[in-house]
Image: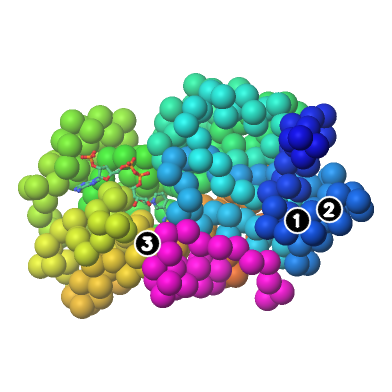
Amino acid sequence: MLLTAFLFGAVGFSSRLFYFQALHSSERFFLCFARGNCEIGKKMINAHTQLFGIIGNPVRHSLSPIIHNEVFRRMGLNAVYIAFEVDNLAKALSGIRALGISGLSVTMPFKSSILSFLDEVDEVAQKIQAVNTIAHKDGILIGYNTDWLGALEALEEVIPLERKKVILIGAGGAARAVAFGLKVRGSEVFIFNRTIEKAAVLASAMGAQYRSLSSIDPMEADVLVNASSVGMAPNDGKSPVAKDMLREGMVVMDLVYQPLQTKLLREAKERGCRVIDGPEMLARQGAAQVEIWTGRKPDLERIKRDIYRALEKRAITSQPTAEFRMTDQ
Ligand SMILES: NC(=O)c1ccc[n+]([C@@H]2O[C@H](COP(=O)([O-])OP(=O)(O)OC[C@H]3O[C@@H](n4cnc5c(N)ncnc54)[C@H](OP(=O)(O)O)[C@@H]3O)[C@@H](O)[C@H]2O)c1
C-alpha cells in the first residue's frame, strides 16, 4: 500500500524510475528511500534524474536502452533511459506529457501514426512522414527523424552518392527514411518491394522508380540497400536477393542488425562487395538522437562498440533481451 502510494503519488516519475531501478533489491530500495537518492553501480538516481525512453511494440529486443544509458553515463548526465512497451499510443503520450519525460525514441509500429499526436514535427520528418525521435521541451512534444541521417552517413563513409544508381529493397518506415536521404544526395533510386502498391506510393513521394521484389534484377547498380525485414531474427537465414545479383565492388548495406552477420552480408562479402552492416546506421541514428536531446555529440565509435558487444552477447546466450550493466569502460 505504502509503496503504491509512493509510486503514483505526487512524486511522479522520478520515484517510479527510482523504483524500477531498485526493484531487484528491496534492501537497497529502502536504503535509497531513506537517503533520497540511489546509487546503482556508478550512477546516481535522485529527484533530478531525467527520464528518456523508447516506445514501441514489441520493444523488449531493443538495443536503445543499452546505447543511451551507456552514452548518458559516459557524458556524466543525470539521466536514465528505459523501454516502454505501448498498446495505446494516445494514453502513452498523455503519460509522457504528464510525467515530464524528457525525450523518446519511437520504433515499430508507431513511427508514422505518432505524427498526428505531436505538437510540432520538424520539416524533414514531415517529408519522410516518420518520426523516430521526440524531444519534450517546455511542455511541447517535437518529432524528428534521425534514421535518414544514420543511413546516409553510414553510406557516405564508403561511397559518394551523387548520381549513383541505388537499389532500395523495402517500402516501410526505414525505407522511407533511406529513400529521402538518397534523393537529397542526388542518387537514382529504384525501389523494390514485396507489396508493389506500397512501392508505388513511396516511389511517387520520393521521385524514385519502383518494381515488385519478385522481378528484381542487378541493373548495374552501384549500391544495394536492404531496408526490408528479410533476414531479421527470428526469420534469419534468408536474403532478399539471389547471390548472383551481387557484383564485385558493389556497396551492399543491410539495415537488419540482428543477426549481425545476415545472409545478404555474408554472400555480398563472398562476391567481393563492400558491405555496411546494421549497427553502422543504428549507432549514427542514436548519436543524432542524443544530440537533439542534449545538444552534445556523443562518441560514435564507443556507441558502435557497445552495440557489437551487446549483439555478440545475445548471439552467444541466444537471449531475445539484452541486459544492461553500467560499466566503467
Ligand atoms: N539499423 C538501423 O538503425 C535500423 C533502423 C530502422 C529499421 N531497421 C531495420 O529495418 C528493417 C525494416 O524496418 P521498418 O521499420 O521499415 O519496418 P516496416 O515498416 O514494418 O517495413 C517492413 C518492410 O519489410 C518488407 N518485408 C517484411 N517481410 C518480408 C518478406 N517476408 N519478404 C519480403 N519483404 C518483406 C515489407 O514489405 P511489405 O510492404 O510487402 O509488407 C516492408 O517493406 C527491420 O529489420 C528493422 O530492424 C534498422
Mark 2 — residue? Answer: 30
Contact between labelled residues 1 and 2, with CB atoms less than 8 Å apart: yes
Sequence order check: which comes first, mark 2 or mark 3?
2
Residue of label 3: 258
Q: Residues within 10 Å of mark 2 (few under 14, many from 20)?
A: few
Left of 14 or right of it: where is 179?
left
Circle 3 packing at 10 Å, graded few (<14), some (14-19), many (20+), is many
What amino acid is found at the position of numbered circle 1 in the picture? Ser
Q: Is residue 122 left or right of residue 129?
A: right
Secondary structure of the residue carrying tag 2 is helix
- Residue 12 within the segment the image draws in magenta: no
Q: Does the magenta run of residues contain 324? A: yes
Please determine whether, in this image, residue 62 is positioned above or below residue 251.
above
Q: Residue at x 20, y 72 (%)?
A: 267
Q: Residues within 10 Å of mark 1 (few under 14, many from 20)?
A: few
User: Where does residue 225 sit, x and y in percent of width and height?
Assistant: 29, 55
Q: Which element is circle 1 on?
A: helix
Quick one: which residue is furthest to the front in this view?
1
Magenta range is 305-329
Q: Quadrant of the C terminus?
A: bottom right
Q: CA gap, disc 2 to disc 3?
A: 39 Å
Circle 1 sits on which residue? Answer: 26
What type is the residue that disc 3 sits on?
Answer: Gln
